[in-house]
Amino acid sequence: MRIGLTGGIASGKSTVARMLAERGALLVDADQVAREVVLPGEKALEAIASAFGQAVLEADGSLNRKALGDIVFRDKAKLARLEAITHPAIRERMQHRIHSYEERHPDRLVVADIPLLYETKQQHLYDGVMVVYVPSDLQRARLMERNEIPAEEAERRISLQMDIEEKRRLADWVIDNGGTLAETEKQIDLFWKSQRLP
Ligand SMILES: CC(C)(COP(=O)(O)OP(=O)(O)OC[C@H]1O[C@@H](n2cnc3c(N)ncnc32)[C@H](O)[C@@H]1O)[C@@H](O)C(=O)NCCC(=O)NCCS
Ligand SMILES: Nc1ncnc2c1ncn2[C@@H]1O[C@H](COP(=O)(O)OP(=O)(O)OP(=O)(O)O)[C@@H](O)[C@H]1O
């Protein structure tokens, strides 16, 4: 079985993915794959440098992620331009990795952590979708703390994604991560049992 794992920015996807992995799931992480496809030597990095200029590169030629984030997270048209470069490569690499896990481990749960799963209409690629939900004020607070950014910057990044309430409505399984980590663990245990996973 393969499931998609999504939610809002800083809602706790990585936290839940880790809990699933501890129980035996195999993980494929879109943010991590997004980092791989822009490593030096990749075509996508050249395309990014042409589109956004040398200022988004470090002295050693690698991507300056903060500089690029500062540009695209405040301009939707520029973000769309970046996505047009990176998304096809991310998608292809994700599917390749999922297939190879499924071939080698047909009995294990494969979890694809994809922040923009609904925004990029990928739900049909999975047996079901798990949404990690937190109320939006808590989401903003966790994002501000983790990324050390002010409230208005956090608000802007949240507003670039589909409303978390809507994601919750679309979900096959909802994990409420608004409580303690132990409370989240309990919900993961219930999910694991409900799917009769080993
Ligand atoms: C702009 C970049 C360089 C900023 O890098 P940075 O290291 O600061 O952030 P990181 O990649 O860890 O992303 C943090 C979070 O931002 C949010 N986010 C990232 N990309 C996007 C996007 N295109 N639209 C909305 N939110 C996004 C996600 O919730 C993600 O989990 C990077 O996010 C990027 O390359 N984005 C485009 C690729 C993409 O769409 N990635 C999302 C996976 S499908
Ligand atoms: N139940 C919880 N209680 C307190 N803090 C939490 C809880 N769950 C997650 N966090 C913290 O909230 C922040 C966001 O969690 P996490 O990084 O797992 O989110 P994410 O959805 O993967 O984020 P992104 O979309 O940016 O990749 C982290 O700093 C994490 O340690």
Image (spheres, rainbow, N blue to C red):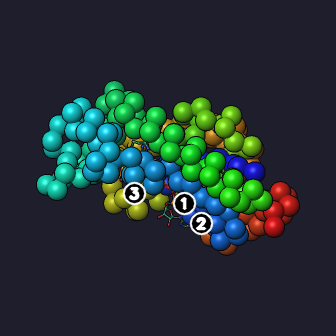
Labels 2, 3: front one: 2
Give the residue type at disc 3.
Met
Which residue is at 22% across, 38% downward? Answer: 49
Q: Which residue is mark 3?
A: 144
**Front residue (pair 108, 29):** 108
**Image mark for residue 18:** 2
In this picture, residue 98 sits left or right of residue 45: right
Mark 1: C-beta under 8 Å from nearest atom of ligand 2? yes
Q: Earlier in the sequence, mark 1 or mark 3?
A: 1
Q: Nearer the viewer, mark 1 or mark 3?
A: 1
Residue 135 shows in the view: no
Give how far across and how far down residue 164 sits, in percent: 58, 42
Comes first in the chain, label 2 or label 3: 2
Asked if the residue at label 2 sits under 8 Å from ligand 2, the reply is yes
Can you identify the residue that label 1 sits on?
14
Quick one: SS at disc 3? helix
Say if mark 1 contacts mark 3, CB within 8 Å. Answer: no
Splitting the image into 4 quarters, where does residue 16 fall?
A: bottom right
Dot 1 falls on a residue whose secondary structure is: helix
Look at the numbered discs 2 and 3 and tell me whether their residues touch, using CB distance below 8 Å: no
Marks 1 and 3, how far apart in space?
Answer: 17 Å
Q: Position of residue 37 (x, y in %)?
A: 39, 46
Left or right: 80 as drawn, with respect to 15: left
Pointer 3: residues within 10 angstroms few (<14), some, or many (20+)?
some
Instruction: Classify 10 Å Cα crowding around label 2: few (below 14), some (14-19), many (20 and above).
Output: some
Question: Marks 1 and 2: in contact by CB < 8 Å?
Answer: yes
What amino acid is at disc 1?
A: Ser
Q: Amino acid at mark 2?
A: Arg
Mark-to-mark CA distance, 2 and 3: 22 Å
Residue 198 shows in this picture? yes
Q: Residue at x 34, y 29 (%)?
A: 81
Report x, y in % for residue 29.
Answer: 53, 54
